[in-house]
Image (tube, rainbow, N blue to C red):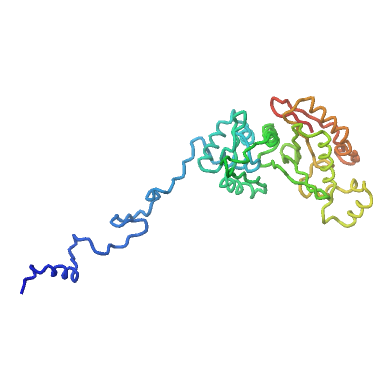
Amino acid sequence: MASTADDPEQPLVQARRSPSVDPSFTPAAPRRQGPGISAGQTRRKGGRRRSDNPHVQRSPQHRRTSTGPRRRELLQALGIFQRATPDQLWKLTRPDNQHDKLVRDNLLDLEEHHLVRIETVREDQRQVWVLTKRGHGEAKKLLEPKGIRISVLREEKYDPVTGKLLGTSYDDHAAAVASTAAELHRAGIGHRLGFQTEIAHRLADGYVQRADLVVRAPEAGVPVLLLEIDRRTEDAHDLVVKLRRYWEWGRLLPKDAAKRTVDLVRSRPDAIEHVDHEQRLWRRFYPPTGREGLVPLAFVFADTTEAKVDNAVAALEEAGRRYWAPRRYDSLYEKAITARGTTARRSPSSSPPWSS
């Protein structure tokens, strides 16, 4: 009979039947580790850290010159005006600063956090900034609780053939609207949260007249002001048509007006003149102006010459007299006035020339 040392199969059989219990040997089935811990790694009591996963990107740190209030102001301004240059944002947020350097620093900080992006660069080398989808959501949280409508998101769309970014044009009219609001704010009229753009006014025939800019600045004595921005690309008589539409909208009655009032207005064309303005439709949208009359409206003439402005104003005064100079209200009213005689201009060097 052969000894076990001479039997080559014997050690193998013994190994299968009685595995070693020597602690220096690795067990056949290693103990199950927790999530994120590889076999043989020492368990850590401090919990899992972000640095354990090299694929997770760390959030960028805020710049030293970037502050929370300034970042909120820029998000709000871009949410209202959709697109703006650093110069416009500076005047809309912190016009007391000497320049727009801090605005540019905060924009770069917001860009690093994927909240804003540069959409285009103008001919004068000024960058035009817009909100990203993530930034649009943040701006909505800042504006909607205050009852302010946020502008439409400027999405990034690319040409399927060339791969070029589409829709990056920043037309001069949009620039003039933002610049007008910026100059008004810089002059102490209005606050960035008191501006709204492209506000619709629906007429009786279904046509919608959109105001380029609406200003609410009660602290400056301007409860509400509608502005139409014209770069002299429209004929003066087109402006008269806009004036007529606003005049018609200001004479509308709300749907729930008293039947007696509705019948009175239908019976005589001039009967609306005797209907108190508190009962008209426009008072549902805008606060009282402190003066009887229609909603205050101003025409702003930008990027043009004084001669063209004078011609446009003359046409508005003559052809649109019926709409901007209604009858004088009776003397029982403390400030019985008409709209005639309220004209003003500003130097083109400081802001676009404008008349109201």
Left or right of 209? Residue 139 is left
Looking at this view, is 259 or 138 the one in front?
A: 138
Q: Which residue is drawn at 82% across and 30% down?
A: 313
Task: Tell which of 325 and 5 is nearer to you.
Answer: 5
| Above/below status of 300 relative to 76 | above
**Quarter of the image holding residue 169?**
top right
Residue 347 occupies quadrant: top right
Position of the N terminus, as image quadrant, is bottom left
Find the residue positioned furthest to the right: 268
**Residue sitting nearer the eye, 290 or 162:** 162
* Numbered-mark total: 0
Quadrant of the rendering where the C terminus is positioned? top right
State whether residue 216 is above or below residue 24.
Answer: above
Front-lying residue, 174 or 336:
174
Q: Which residue is drawn at 32% across and 54% down?
A: 44
Side of 57 relative to 231 (left or right): left
Residue 310 appearing in the image = yes
Q: Residue furthest front?
A: 161
Is 210 situated above or below 355? below
Expressed as whole percent of the image width and height from the top left, the position of residue 229 reads 74, 35
Q: Visible in this render: residue 73?
A: no
Q: Is residue 313 left or right of residue 10?
A: right
From the top left corner, tell me how far across and down residue 63 is, in percent. Answer: 49, 37
Q: In x, y percent, where is residue 327?
A: 90, 39
The image shows residue 132 at horizontal and vertical percentages of 57, 44
